[in-house]
Image (cartoon, helix red, strand yellow):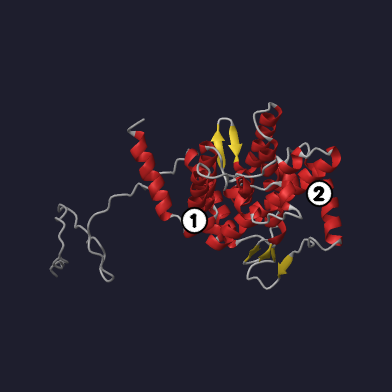
């Protein structure tokens, strides 16, 4: 254990050294608020439904509740989530977009959570849901990061046995948290934070995030139904389309827009808003990697024929266009030795 600690510290120091200002500031804020909780009561930094709405209107809690942790394991989860977002999402989006994403998710989690508990109070008239419940922690942002990873690298494998891909991680963790809640091992605000983090991050990435190709990501692999098992996807897709059509009519969401570039040098190019060139390049690299691995496993069994031809041996002679290669041998005489010089035989004497 003592040997592993220096390596872990060195690795953590290298990660923080290469991190951006946004990641360092978020990690520092989490640590500061956790240490501050030992000196003063930090409950005023969490979202309390009864105090968020008028007449109290504690609006600052929408900005601070995502950074407030009360246990050391919660601090570890929060720091890990921020660091992973900085390593995997920030190179694709940039530091400013990562900060915007963090703010959108946490503000949405605070508002939706407070509104849900307000509705619960209106149904039960139990003041516990207004003034005892506190929404805080990084579970909402964790859900948002998992949704963003599904969008950008959903085909990557997290576990090989059993095979678990990034695309199933959001709902898999939601099912785990639901089981912990049913076993009374998890409080309801934590489950609500994670669920609203999933929903708000998907809505933002699907319809509102700005990038080089416009706004949102209307790709089929990022549809709302793809978060659910295949057996439920037709039903969920039908309900999602109905809700989307209703939101389009009230002008909250926009229709799916397709652009056709008929002036492309090859054939007609169809591009969807939200298809980032970096994401397309990443998918091409993954496809090339898979193809190379498949080709390495296939052995070429074909045998090429020998290219050596049987050539007849011929004497080393100097070809002449005027004289024959071999002079005639007179009868009674042996064959003259071959020479590289051209010789003439003496003519017979005339009687």
Q: Residue furthest bottom?
A: 263
**Left or right: 23 as drawn, with respect to 124:** left
Rendered location of residue 273, percent (x, y): 69, 62
- The kind of secondary structure element at disc 1 is helix
**Left or right: 75 as drawn, with respect to 222:** left
**Left or right: 205 as drawn, with respect to 2:** right
- The kind of secondary structure element at disc 2 is helix
Instruction: Tell me how far mark 2 sits from mark 1, CA to CA.
Output: 37 Å
The residue pinned by badge 2 equals: 240
For label 1, the crowd category at 10 Å Cα-Cα, with few meaning under 14, some 14 to 19 and many 20 or more, is few
The residue pinned by badge 1 equals: 25
Q: Residue furthest top?
A: 183
Residue nearer the viewer, 254 or 144 = 144
Rendered location of residue 299, percent (x, y): 47, 38
Foreground disc of the pair 2, 1: 1
Residue nearer the viewer, 75 or 44 = 44
Q: Quadrant of the C terminus?
A: bottom left
Residue drawn at (14%, 55%) of the image: 337
First of labels 2, 1 by sequence position: 1
Rendered location of residue 275, percent (x, y): 65, 60
Residue nearer the viewer, 143 or 44 = 44
Rendered location of residue 78, percent (x, y): 54, 44
Report whether residue 220 is seen: no
Residue drawn at (66%, 30%) of the image: 180
Q: Quadrant of the N terminus?
A: top left
Report whether residue 119 is seen: yes
Q: Which mark is residue 68?
A: none
């Amino acid at each position: 254990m003592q040997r592993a600690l220096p390596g872990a510290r060195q690795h953590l120091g290298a990660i923080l050294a290469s991190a951006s200002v946004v990641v360092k500031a978020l990690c520092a804020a989490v640590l500061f608020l956790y240490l501050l909780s030992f000196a003063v009561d930090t409950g005023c930094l969490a979202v309390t439904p009864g105090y968020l709405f008028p007449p109290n209107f504690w609006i600052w809690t929408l900005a601070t509740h995502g950074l407030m942790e009360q246990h050391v394991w919660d601090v570890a989860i929060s720091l890990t989530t921020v660091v992973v977002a900085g390593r995997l999402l920030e190179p694709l989006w940039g530091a400013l977009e990562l900060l915007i994403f963090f703010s959108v998710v946490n503000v949405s989690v605070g508002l939706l959570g407070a509104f849900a508990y307000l509705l619960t109070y209106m149904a039960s008239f139990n003041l516990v849901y207004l003034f005892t419940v506190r929404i805080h922690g990084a579970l909402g942002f964790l859900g948002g990061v998992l949704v963003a990873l599904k969008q950008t690298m959903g085909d990557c494998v997290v576990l090989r046995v059993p095979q678990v891909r990034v695309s199933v991680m959001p709902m898999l963790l939601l099912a785990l948290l639901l089981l912990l809640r049913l076993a009374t091992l998890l409080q309801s605000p934590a489950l609500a934070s994670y669920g609203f983090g999933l929903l708000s991050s998907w809505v933002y990435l699907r319809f509102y995030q700005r990038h080089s190709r416009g706004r949102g990501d209307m790709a089929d692999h990022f549809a709302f139904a793809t978060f659910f098992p295949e057996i439920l996807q037709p039903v969920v897709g039908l309900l999602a389309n109905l809700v989307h059509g209703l939101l389009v009519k009230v002008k909250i969401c926009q229709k799916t827009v397709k652009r056709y570039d008929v002036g492309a040098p090859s054939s007609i190019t169809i591009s969807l808003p939200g298809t980032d060139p970096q994401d397309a390049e990443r998918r091409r690299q993954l496809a090339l990697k898979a193809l190379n691995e498949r080709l390495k496993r296939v052995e070429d069994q074909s045998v090429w024929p020998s290219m050596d031809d049987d050539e007849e041996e011929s004497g080393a002679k100097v070809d002449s266009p005027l004289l024959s290669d071999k002079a005639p041998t007179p009868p009674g005489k042996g064959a003259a030795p071959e020479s590289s010089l051209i010789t003439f035989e003496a003519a017979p004497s005339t009687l």
